[in-house]
Image (cartoon, grey):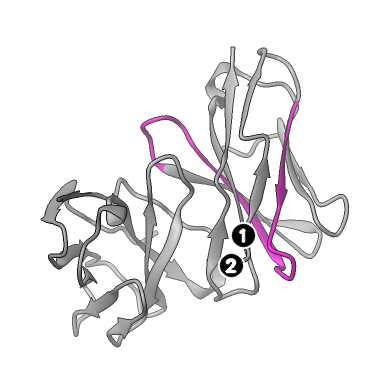
Amino acid sequence: EPEVTQTPSHQVTQMGQEVILRCVPISNHLYFYWYRQILGQKVEFLVSFYNNEISEKSEIFDDQFSVERPDGSNFTLKIRSTKLEDSAMYFCASQLGSGNTIYFGEGSWLTVV
Amino acid sequence: DAKTTQPNSMESNEEEPVHLPCNHSTISGTDYIHWYRQLPSQGPEYVIHGLTSNVNNRMASLAIAEDRKSSTLILHRATLRDAAVYYCILQTTDSWGKLQFGAGTQVVVTP
């Protein structure tokens, strides 16, 4: 079965450093998402991306965050200057079309020290 | 956003059915009822969704009340692999990908 893949699986970074989390969505999907889950808390929506632009974003997704689809296969989340509170599991997701099933990756665990 | 209410946890014996309730009394006419689950250390996984009629797929069944103010996810024969947090989420067609996860129901399956 096709799957969403994410790298790295775990990254430790120092506060203030830039981090890029990478995702390879399912190949023919058109809608892309990032979610995060702080340890012990709920899964939270960050951003949705369609047709090479952000279609919706949450309050969490401030100016420190950006997303990009640099080529036909990758979808990245960049955190410009990480803070301790950015420590979380970040999930990428993709969807064939509006109304179709959303598929999540296994997540990238980010630890900011 | 319309809210859902689920029990914090439920326990089941292996190979027994599991009925997971969800209340959504403020559901609107355009809200779909989605269920996702999250196994330990994994991303959320789609289980099933419906609008008004009951739905069945290979993973589970979804029974929706006639007034749509509640629904029940049914796992017909629980296995140890079904131990996960199950989320009931309301979704509108104009914001399909923005899933609002709650705390969900932790399902414990005992051998």
- In the image, A93 versus A47, the foreground residue is A93
- Image quarter (top left, top right, bottom left or bottom right) of the C terminus of chain A: top right
Q: Residue at x 36, y 80 (%)?
A: B57
Q: Tell whether A83 sits left or right of A40.
A: right
| Magenta segment | A19-42
Q: Residues within 10 Å of mark 1 (few under 14, many from 20)?
A: some
Figure check: B7 above or below B74: above
Q: Residue at x 30, y 73 (%)?
A: B60
Q: Position of residue A92 (x, y in %)?
A: 61, 49
Mark 2 residue type: Glu
Q: Position of residue B76 (x, y in %)?
A: 20, 72
Residue A99 is inside the magenta segment: no
Figure check: B46 above or below A81: below
Q: Residues within 10 Å of mark 2 (few under 14, many from 20)?
A: few
Q: Residue at x 17, y 52 (%)?
A: B7
Tell me the element at label 1. loop
Mark 1 residue type: Glu
CA gap between label 1 and label 2 equals 6 Å
Q: Residue at x 30, y 45 (%)?
A: B103
Tell me the element at label 2. loop
| Image quadrant assignment for residue A20 | top right
Q: Tell whether B7 sits left or right of A56.
A: left
Q: Are marks 1 and 2 in contact (CB under 8 Å)?
A: yes
Query: Could one spot residue A59 in this view of the protein?
Result: no
Q: Position of residue B9 (x, y in %)?
A: 17, 47
- Image quarter (top left, top right, bottom left or bottom right) of the N terminus of chain A: bottom right
Q: What chain does badge 1 belong to?
A: A
What is the count of numbered marks?
2
Figure check: B34 above or below B40: below
Task: Report the residue marked by disc 1.
Answer: A3
Q: Which mark is residue A1?
A: 2
Q: Tell whether A59 sits left or right of B25.
A: right
